[in-house]
Amino acid sequence: MFGRNRAVASVDVSRNQLEFDLSKVVFPNSLSWLDLNHNKIYGSLPVGLTALDLQYLNVSYNRLCGQIPAGGKLQSFDNYSYFHNNSNQQHMATVFRLCLLLVLVSPALSELCNPKDKKVLLQIKKDLNNPYLLASWDPNTDCCDWYTVTCDSKTNRINSLTIFDSAIPTTNFSAQIPPSIGDLPYLQTLEFHKLPNLTGPLQPAIAKLTRLTYLTISWTNLSGPVPTFLAQLTNLVFLDLSFNNLSGSIPPSLSQLPNLLSLRLDRNHLTGSIPDSFGYFKVTEIYIYLSHNNLTGEIPKSLANLNFTRIDLSRNKLEGDASVLFGPNKATQILDVSRNQLEFNLSNVVFSNSLTSLDLNHNKIYGSLPVGLTALNLQFFNVSYNRLCGEIPIVDVSRNQLEFNLSNAMFTNSLTSLDLNHNKIYGGLPVELTALNFQYLNVSYNRLCGEIPVGGKLQSFDMYSYFHNKCLCGSPLPPCK
């Protein structure tokens, strides 16, 4: 999936068992989103990352070492993009190193585990029915060395607890979130992930964890409402409650979280409308996932105030006008409102230049496809099952296994963007292409032959629009022999 010449904007392979040397990876220049967290990736961060216009980066929970390269966007991300890479997390925002100090396992710290924290952890283990996953939680050893536990290097207080495993024996782990979790006052990261037998509501004790910046409780069987007390956790940057059985309405008070950058409530059973207050988050560049719920009503007009990086409202029962989500000056990269009952005129929509994925399928959207779509570097586009009409200015069937004779193809006069790259298309370029007002053309990586017709816009594109074909020749490629 990597490679300098690939047109990839987003890569997310998080939470797998991938094991490779990141130092040797060459990234495409188009990459703006890279999520590798929770794998077994080793090596160091390649200096090539500094050349990318990254909007999101997460390489936490791996086995990386070495100094984080200076430059580009790498220093714009916080500690949580890098932590848990064989380091003690000491002052990472300043020194930006992944594994300079290994004092967490030194004898000097072996006796410094805070006894209050240790007592709480042992109670948590008991409340979770002593699962095998927590076998390392031995009262005779240092709690800072226990699996899923991280201590602060200065205070030796527990600052991270990440309990996740997709292979926990079902007979050994059946419980609710222990109330004693609230007795770890220095906790900054709390994660319960892929624990199918974790049930019950979100414990009110979590409200006591006022230092939390990262809260993930996902892929469990938690039920009940999204609690309003979450608004008290004013340091939260990431809140992920996805893939649970939560029900009820979305608390408007979540918009009061002043530092929130990411909100995931997708794949639950939430009802009601999207709160109007969501248009007034303190941080305007945010990504929100509310998909796969039972949300109803219209999309609040106040959401026009936000500069979403990613927004996914798909598979709900939302109605009305979604055009408030669009705009030429927004930083939106991925927008998905598919499978709702939205009804608006797409002809009037102006898109952000940063948009790489647009999914509007299965709605009641009408009008025609705006010509502005031709200027976008879309990697994914779906407007099927709507009420659109008019001519299609864009054709993008790139990176498939299509096999046909291009010489016999007929094109509409309104076509302004044609992307056929990375297929098995053969034949030659029809001379009719010279009559079209192309804004974009790419037929590279096919099996085309013959001379490129002279005229129209065909010579205005560089060789990369045509190269890697069987025997295509003529300007801008080398002359035919």
Image (cartoon, grey):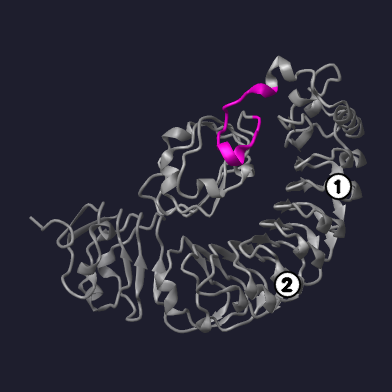
The answer to whether residue 440 is above or below residue 263 is: below
Whether residue 238 is visible to the viewer of this picture, yes or no, is yes
Q: Nearer the viewer, residue 312 or 167?
A: 312
Front residue of 452 and 212 = 212
- What is the secondary structure assignment of the residue under circle 1? helix
- Bounds of the magenta segment: 88-104
Q: Can residue 274 be seen here?
A: no
Q: Main secondary structure of the magenta part?
A: loop
**Residues at marks 1 and 2 touching, judged by CB atoms closer than 8 Å:** no
Q: Amino acid at mark 2?
A: Lys
Return the disc, 1 or 2, that comes first in the chain's sequence: 1
Left/right placement of residue 311 relative to residue 185 reads left
Q: Quadrant of residue 457?
A: bottom left
Q: Residues within 10 Å of mark 1 (few under 14, many from 20)?
A: many
Q: Split into 4 quadrants, where in the image is the N terminus?
A: top left
At a point 35% along the width and 55% down the height, the residue shown is: 423
Percent position (x, y) of residue 299?
70, 75
In this view, the residue farthest toward the left is 481
Quick one: label 2, few (<14), some, or many (20+) residues within 10 Å? Answer: many
- Amino acid type of the residue tagged 1 in the rendering: Ile
Q: Which residue is labeled 1 in the image?
A: 206
Quadrant where the C terminus lies? bottom left
The percent position of residue 200, horizontal first and vertical second, equals 90, 48
Label 2 element class:
strand
The residue located at (32%, 81%) in the rendering is 413
Q: Viewer-nearest of labels 1 and 2?
A: 1
> Residue 105 occupies which quadrant of the picture?
top right
According to the picture, the residue beneath numbered tag 2 turns out to be 317
Q: Give left or right: position of 441 versus 247.
A: left
Examine the structure image and report whether residue 97 is included in the region drawn in magenta.
Answer: yes
Q: Residue at x 58, y 61 (%)?
A: 309
Q: Quadrant of residue 147?
A: top right
